[in-house]
Amino acid sequence: MAGQDIETLIKQIAKLPSLGSRSARRIVLHLLGKRDAVFLPLIEGLTRVADNIKTCEICGNFDTASPCSICSSASRDDSIICVVRDVADLWAMERVALFKGKYHVLGGVLSALEGIVPEDLNIDSLAARLASGKIRELILALPATIDGQITSHYLSSRFKNSGVAITTLAQGIPMGAELDYMDEGTLQLALNSRKTL
Amino acid sequence: MAGQDIETLIKQIAKLPSLGSRSARRIVLHLLGKRDAVFLPLIEGLTRVADNIKTCEICGNFDTASPCSICSSASRDDSIICVVRDVADLWAMERVALFKGKYHVLGGVLSALEGIVPEDLNIDSLAARLASGKIRELILALPATIDGQITSHYLSSRFKNSGVAITTLAQGIPMGAELDYMDEGTLQLALNSRKTL
């Protein structure tokens, strides 16, 4: 229908997350119709990021510098490390703009099903950071899934003698939720962890 | 949160059709995580298309050559032209793989509201193609909207003395539709245009 190069590009775009072949086609048509205003600046933006992107040597965040802007920030608390599964979760935490410590990206969670063992994750580098003696608290902000919880357990038992306080995110009913729509596991957990007002 | 370049790129991607800031962020994270397998090939694909894309001088299709692969195809019927609003509609027709003639992209439809007059559309070039005397039929495949229908009327009255048969796509109930869910306009039209079995 269109040239081979365009077809190839549509297939490449269709494989990106949250896109399919129909939306990929719409995007390509949009780009072709706005070559100077959208298409060329987008290529420029992608190239700039691809050329300059680095994985932070300390925490594992993506940034154009290593150490990343969070690790090298003097205004953030060096003594608290928030452990997250991946950079997406780190960015989610940063959007809240409440946490003012540093991060550590595990690069995944333990999984018996997928054969992911502690050696596959960035745990040794976390141990090295804790061994520096400057860390006061480790916040485990891992997913509230079985694998995430198993990983939290593993980390808390591995580091329990390191002299660092180990905490985890509170679990319960999310903000704005109707009880009616909550799964039983969440209700059970929220009831068991109920707090005095 | 991440570097300025990444933030800029996320904003650029979020402005593309069918995407928003959340999916743009997911896409950028996906690209950053698969630099060699996805990110660099995507930039290459985009650059190749941006460098080579042309608007076909005959029909207005996007292709890497001009005339485009459809206009220069010897196996397609030169005597039938299908008039479409834009390249997206041309590609939609091509996906059906039933039409074996040539196309003409109008570049829009007449619109009193948006102030689009005949001079804004590729109508003169269509008139020139009809004047060649080789055209037997003109299929008006414009949107079934008010503006699309007005444009069809305009074209059919303008070219009614050109000795070319002017046809339009059939209108009625779409395939697989429940009558219950059809709007009254469509039902009315389908009833008025009913056919003998």
Image (cartoon, coloured by chain):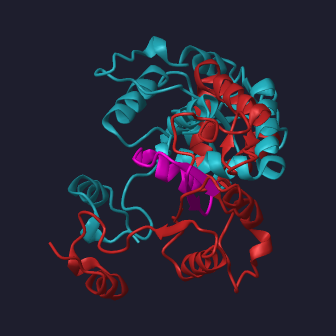
Chain colours: A red, B cyan
What quarter of the picture does the C terminus of chain B occupy?
bottom left
For this orientation, the residue located farthest to the top is B119
What residue lies at 73% left-to-right and 80% top-to-bottom? A114
Residue B172, position as x, y percentages in the image: 37, 57
Looking at the image, residue A192 sits to the left or right of residue B165; the answer is: left
What residue lies at 80% left-to-right and 73% top-to-bottom? A119
- Residue A87 visible? The answer is no
Give the magenta-colored segment's residue range.
A79-104
Count of numbered badges drawn on the protein? 0
Looking at the image, residue A30 sits to the left or right of residue A189; the answer is: right
What residue lies at 58% left-to-right and 35% top-to-bottom? A73
Residue A54, position as x, y percentages in the image: 75, 40
What residue lies at 76% left-to-right and 78% top-to-bottom? A117
Q: Nearer the viewer, residue A110 or B150?
A: A110
Q: Nearer the viewer, residue A80 or A178?
A: A80
Tell me: residue A112, above or below residue A131.
below
The stretch drawn in magenta includes residue A87: yes
The stretch drawn in magenta includes residue B4: no
What quarter of the picture does the N terminus of chain B occupy?
top right
Q: Nearer the viewer, residue B169 or A7?
A: A7
For this orientation, the residue located farthest to the left is A197
- Residue B183 visible? The answer is yes
Residue A32, position as x, y percentages in the image: 64, 29
Q: Quadrant of residue A3?
A: top right
Looking at the image, residue B56 sits to the left or right of residue A182; the answer is: right
Q: Nearer the viewer, residue B71 or B86?
A: B86
